[in-house]
Image (spheres, helix red, strand yellow):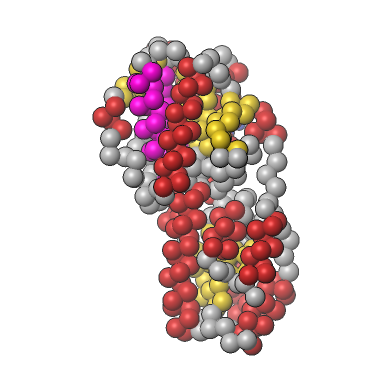
């Protein structure tokens, strides 16, 4: 394979730039020409394609977001949109494509592979919600961002003896809440994968209060319900001075952590190697700290069990 392309799609995630850099530079070092597709599948359909040299990805490894930009594109969901995309790639004589994104982006990449155009996926999403890989690019940075926010909230919560309900991202997945909740010392963590009783949450709050806790922090994953409704219920039932903070898109930005830079670099290089070896229709991911390749179908049919050990641990450490 002599000409390949790289693009980012769906929600951006810190560490995507490290992956783009790795694809471009690994490709060049293997003697390939590498092209960047701007603005995801929408840009691909419109032919926003530029050749990239080694210097074009300089000074990006430390930056959040994606220098190629990203999008969500309805037209690409259709056969017609996908054929338009393939036509654009063929006009540039591009023979293989690396798609950095989440589940939806991989479904698009699989459609291209089924139509005969070789694609490889790299999991990039802060949600850590892709079966077949233990971790996705951006998750570690997002967790660190949330912890930093919790630490700050804790300062003001202690000063005023308040209860804080903090809503974090994750769409349908509770990993950001779970990891940041445990590492941030939250009193309760509510995630969509585990049923909860608000009464239990309040009891834990009241017990802590009796023992002299000066503040309490409850982390709610966005997939559970709006944090405001939990905050309202706590305030009305316990009478505790309660505030609600929704962290929002701040969790998607910022300089990627060392782990995310490593992950992006390793997966980016592996994706190019795979295309070079004639592989397609697969995602590269991490299992037992080793890079593995998994068929897209296996990714889509895979399950993502919640780490109940971490969930129980968080409960027993936050008494
Ligand atoms: P993510 O990749 O982060 O899960 P989305 O679910 O928004 O993000 O998907 C990104 C884009 O991938 C969509 O806007 C669409 O263009 C494309 N896509 C998603 N699902 C499909 C599908 N089933 N078939 C073809 N393309 C898809
Ligand atoms: O998938 C990443 C994510 O940030 C989710 O955590 C969140 O639910 C969603 O994207 C937000 O999407 P948007 O950027 O469209 O607001």
Residue 125 position in % (x across, y down):
51, 43
Pick whichever, 188 or 105, lies toward us: 188
Q: Nearer the viewer, residue 45 or 301?
A: 301
Q: Residue at x 39, y 25 (%)?
A: 26
Q: On the rendered structure, is 216 left or right of 264?
A: right
Apparent side of residue 74 relative to residue 198 in the rendered image (left or right): left
Q: Please report the bounds of the magenta region as a residue range.
A: 4-30
Q: Is residue 3 above or below residue 226?
A: above
Q: State the image coordinates of residue 314 (x, y, percent, origin top left).
A: 63, 65
In the image, 39 versus 181, the foreground residue is: 181
Magenta-drawn stretch contains 213 = no
Give the quadrant of the C terminus: bottom right
Q: Position of residue 8 (x, y in %)?
A: 44, 34
In which quadrant of the rendered view does residue 309 lie? bottom right
Pick whichever, 106 or 277, lies toward us. Answer: 277
- Residue lying at 70% horizontally and 34% vertically, measured from the top left: 301
């Amino acid at each position: 394979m002599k000409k390949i392309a790289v693009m980012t799609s769906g929600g951006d995630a810190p560490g995507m730039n490290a992956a783009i850099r790795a694809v471009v530079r690994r490709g060049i070092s293997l003697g390939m020409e590498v092209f960047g597709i701007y603005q995801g599948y929408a840009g691909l359909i419109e032919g926003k394609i530029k050749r990239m040299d080694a210097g074009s990805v300089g000074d990006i490894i430390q930056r959040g977001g994606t220098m190629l930009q990203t999008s969500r594109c309805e037209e690409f969901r259709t056969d017609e949109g996908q054929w338009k995309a393939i036509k654009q790639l063929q006009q540039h004589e591009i023979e293989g494509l690396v798609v950095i994104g989440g589940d939806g982006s991989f479904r698009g990449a699989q459609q291209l592979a089924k139509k005969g155009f070789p694609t490889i996926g790299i999991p990039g999403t802060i949600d850590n919600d892709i079966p077949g890989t233990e971790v996705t690019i951006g998750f570690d940075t997002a967790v660190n961002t949330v912890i930093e926010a919790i630490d700050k909230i804790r300062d003001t919560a202690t000063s005023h003896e308040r209860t804080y309900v903090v809503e974090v991202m994750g769409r349908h997945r509770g990993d950001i809440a779970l990891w940041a909740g445990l590492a941030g010392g939250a009193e309760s963590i509510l995630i969509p994968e585990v049923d909860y009783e608000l009464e239990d949450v309040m009891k834990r709050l009241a017990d802590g209060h009796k023992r002299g806790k000066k503040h309490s922090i409850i982390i709610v994953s966005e997939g559970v319900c709006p944090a405001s409704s939990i905050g309202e219920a706590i305030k009305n039932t316990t009478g505790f001075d309660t505030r609600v903070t929704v962290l929002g898109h701040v969790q998607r930005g910022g300089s990627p952590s060392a782990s995310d830079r490593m992950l992006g670099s390793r997966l980016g290089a592996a994706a190019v190697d795979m295309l070079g070896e004639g592989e397609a229709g697969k995602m590269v991911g991490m299992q037992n700290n080793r890079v593995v390749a998994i068929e897209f179908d296996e990714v889509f049919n895979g399950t993502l069990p919640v780490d109940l050990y971490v969930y129980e641990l968080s409960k027993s450490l936050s008494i």
